[in-house]
Amino acid sequence: MIGIIDYGMGNLHSVSKALERLGLPYFLASEPEKLIKAEGLILPGVGSFRDAMTILKDNRQDGFIKTWSKDGRPLLGICLGMQLLFEGSEENGNTEGLKLLSGYAKRFKGVSDEGVGYKVPHMGWNKLTFNQPNHQILKGTEEGHVYFVHSYVVETEKKDVVIASSDYFGEVPAVVGQGLTMGAQFHPEKSGQLGLQVLENFGKIVTGRRTIREQI
Amino acid sequence: MVTKRIIPCLDVKEGRVVKGVQFVDLRDAGDPVELASFYDNQGADELVFLDISASHEGRKTMVEVVNEVAGTLAIPFTVGGGINTLEDMKRILRAGADKVSLNTAAVTSPELITEGADYFGSQCIVVAIDAKYDDSLGSWRVYTHGGRTETDWEVTEWAKEVTSRGAGEILLTSMDQDGAKNGYDLPLIKRVNEVVTVPVIASGGAGEKSHFVEVFEEAGADAALAASIFHYKETSVEEVKSYLREQGVNVR
């Protein structure tokens, strides 16, 4: 069963609905005591990085998520939830993140290298390029368009963290991961068939581990 | 690079799609859920639902519609019409809409834009602007109450005001072009697009495929909304998008 981490940041409904459509069982919870019973966790979220980290700390969810990830259990951050997996963000000054992945969220500059202004947020459908086409989270998908809404973009020196990327006046890490700690900058629940496939793949990673455990 | 979006708009009254949508292949042409899936399958990038219910009951029905649409649609959708309080926004967004659109309420209580943006994030808050050219102003004037009430706002001033208050997107309707089917109001769209840094959705006037090319290429719109041209099957989302692709416009 997938546990969706409820911490009051944004819309859990569309993620839940997408899992229902895929026939993936899930529950919503905020308490670590309940979430620990899940086989995989989804960390959704839209809004402010700093508010999100404050709430995660107040709910004792931050330490729980870190331990979960370090134990090698499946975790998928979506949008802000993905950015929270990194070291920090320059939103509202600098705020520390969960530090599970190497990289930092920085605001889109709003001006291109050639000095031309562009719109922020990065909102709408943009094309994915697969950096790691054989990654299990991309199984059965092809490079296509997905739906983004964000004003901050992760910058990372560790290129092997980036599984798929998009281009918006520079590289936008779109699917990231290290081991089973993964994230999507776009909204898979709002990205048509490609997005649903990514969620389904996460579901398969979660149930796949169960099968292995049962065999042992 | 981010693609240009095509957004069909559906008017919903007491839970039913109105304006005589003509689809022979649908079981129930008035069912918002079925129509939403239809447009999703055609390649629509987003949908807008405009609740034109006059009654309280109708508004409650809209929440149920949103809940049901959210369960079937895999693309984002916006709900507008009758959203006057933070509570109204909460009801609609919690039912599964991705964005809410404020129109009259944004003018009468502009603090609502900020409250909504603080609570849900700017990406959830669309401000719909109805504008009409005014000779004495030498520019476009903003109207409310479905175009019945004139305000003191000049359109670019209002657009700047709403974005500074936290609007994440502007849905800009030309009252002069609306229903005329001879193209979007390019000067209006261009003018507003120049003064804001959030996406602008152009609305009003789409009558043929070439109008979409113009509004993207000449006016710089980020998205184009249309209703009757799609509902009456004068063209389809699929056709428009393949035409745009041929013309070199970046679409999904």
Image (spheres, coloured by chain):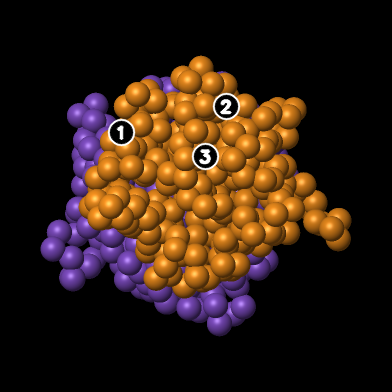
Q: Which residue is mark 2?
A: A53
Mark 1 or mark 2: which comes first in sequence? 1
* Nearer to us: label 1 or label 3: 3
Horizontal and vertical percent position of residue B108: 52, 23
Residue A193 relative to residue B178: left or right: left
Q: Which residue is mark 3?
A: A70
Horizontal and vertical percent position of residue B165: 63, 28
Q: How many numbered marks appear?
A: 3
The chain letter of the purple chain reads B
Vertical comparison of B36 with A36: above or below? below
Mark 2 or mark 3: which comes first in sequence? 2
* Nearer to us in this view, B138 or A113: A113
Residue A163 relative to residue A29: left or right: right
Residue located at (59% from left, 31% from top) = A48
Q: Are marks 2 and 3 on the same chain?
A: yes
Mark 1 or mark 3: which comes first in sequence? 1
Whether label 2 touches label 3, CB < 8 Å: no
Q: Amino acid at mark 3?
A: Lys
C-alpha span from label 1 to label 2 = 23 Å
Q: Secondary structure at mark 3?
A: helix
Chain where mark 2 sits: A
Chain A shown in which color?
Answer: orange
Horizontal and vertical percent position of residue B83: 40, 30
Residue located at (18% from left, 65% from top) = B26
Chain where mark 3 sits: A
**In the image, farthest residue toward the bottom:** B246
User: Mark 3: few, some, or many residues within 10 Å (few <14, many ≥20)?
Assistant: few
Q: Which residue is mark 1?
A: A37
* Nearer to us in this view, A151 or B169: A151
* Nearer to us: label 2 or label 3: 3
